Amino acid sequence: MTTQRTPQRLTSPKDLVEAGLAEPERLPELEAVARRYAIGLTPALAALVEPNNHDDPIARQFVPDPRELIRDPAERDDPIGDDAMSPVKGLVHRCPDRVLIKLVAVCAVYCRFCFRREQVGPGSGSLSAAEFAAAVDYVRAHAGIWEVILTGGDPLTLSPRRIAEATQALAAINHVKVLRWHTRLPIAAPERVTKQMARALMAEGKTTVIAVHANHPRELNEGARSACRRLAAEGAMLVSQSVLLKDVNDDPETLIDLMRAFVEAGVKPYYLHHGDLAPGTAHWRVSIARGQELMRLLRARLSGLATPTYMLDIPGGRGKVPIGPQWLHSGDNEQHVVTDPQGIQHVYADRLGADS
Ligand code: SF4
């Protein structure tokens, strides 16, 4: 009788080479990157990689590249300015009605373009029970906080028991109405998104939102779609997050397939992020002009339901804004020029009632 080895999570350059995801001669350069940034790739995602295709858009997101050690002068360890807005360890209060709580600093997979790459990795500090209690105290003391975003790292790497404890502690605060969890787990390890976990995320009288991170349509295979359906079946609202990545999804066909795959999985396309200025990520970034052009093409071919918003996190913690493209330009005398999805311009004038 033959015994089958259970596929393991890949966490080192040697693992990646042995799995056929990188050529053996690349081992020294992979190890140089691994000394600085964590490696992690789950069996579920590794199984999606096309054999012998080292340019595979899924493999590229997780296999280190020596360019990660080249730092552009504009890149920052904390590109979106979390630290400057952190009154309590692990909590970021940038906008009046919501806070982020970074519950854990570990992930099931380590994306090579991660905007928090200087903070995440095995052994990096996750919140202790006392630190989480201090974050909850802060939320309780600020009556304007309507939404709490649980992030990290990937907070769904916690056990259902710990997820339930965090959910219930925050749900007990009357003014908190929405709990939003940012995760890659339904894609990276769909088998871990069990009914028990889905239930742990819910709280009576509160809205649970799961922001699912995926960047290529092949990531949303049947396993991932089932995980999304298990979350929705317990009552979660699902929205998407993707990063615009060079040679992964910076073409209209891939983005259209990705956004349709989200909708087919019951996930509303929400944000397409412009790449942040994280260290060693210049080779991932696409120009804003190209991003806007792609958004124009998406608008022409996708329903509004499947169209995300293209977002830039302004460096230094100044907030997140949509970056176009602009469809309407206003002139004097309530005259506007509006461009239709095919690129043809039209004049539109305000027509207001006499008492407006
Ligand atoms: S899952 Fe999120 S936090 Fe973790 S490495 Fe990827 S982008 Fe970063």
Image (spheres, grey):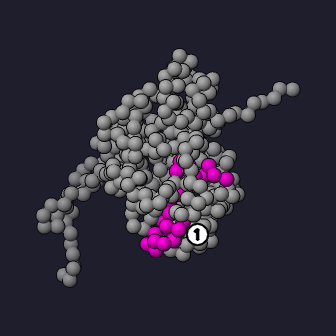
Looking at the picture, does residue 170 appear above or below residue 313?
below
Tell me the SS state at disc 1: helix
Q: Is residue 353 visible?
A: yes
State whether residue 341 appears in this view.
no
Q: Is-magenta flag for residue 139?
A: yes
Q: Going by the image, does 344 lie left or right of 134?
A: left
Left or right relative to 264: residue 74: left
Q: Residue furthest top?
A: 25
> Does 4 appear above or below 311?
above
Viewer-proximal residue among 248 and 62:
62
Q: Which residues are magenta?
A: 136-159
**Can you identify the residue that label 1 sits on?**
171
Image x and y of residue 71, in percent: 36, 33
Please tell me whether residue 337 belongs to the stretch shown in magenta: no
Amino acid type shown at disc 1: Ala
Residue 247 position in % (x across, y down): 42, 33
* Residue farthest to the front, as pictured: 130
Residue 70 placement (x, y as % from top left): 38, 30
Q: Residue at x 54, y 21 (%)?
A: 27
Residue pictured at 27% horizontal, 55% vertical: 327
Query: Residue 64's spot in the image, x, y percent?
Result: 50, 30
Who is closer to the viewer here, 89 or 226?
Answer: 89
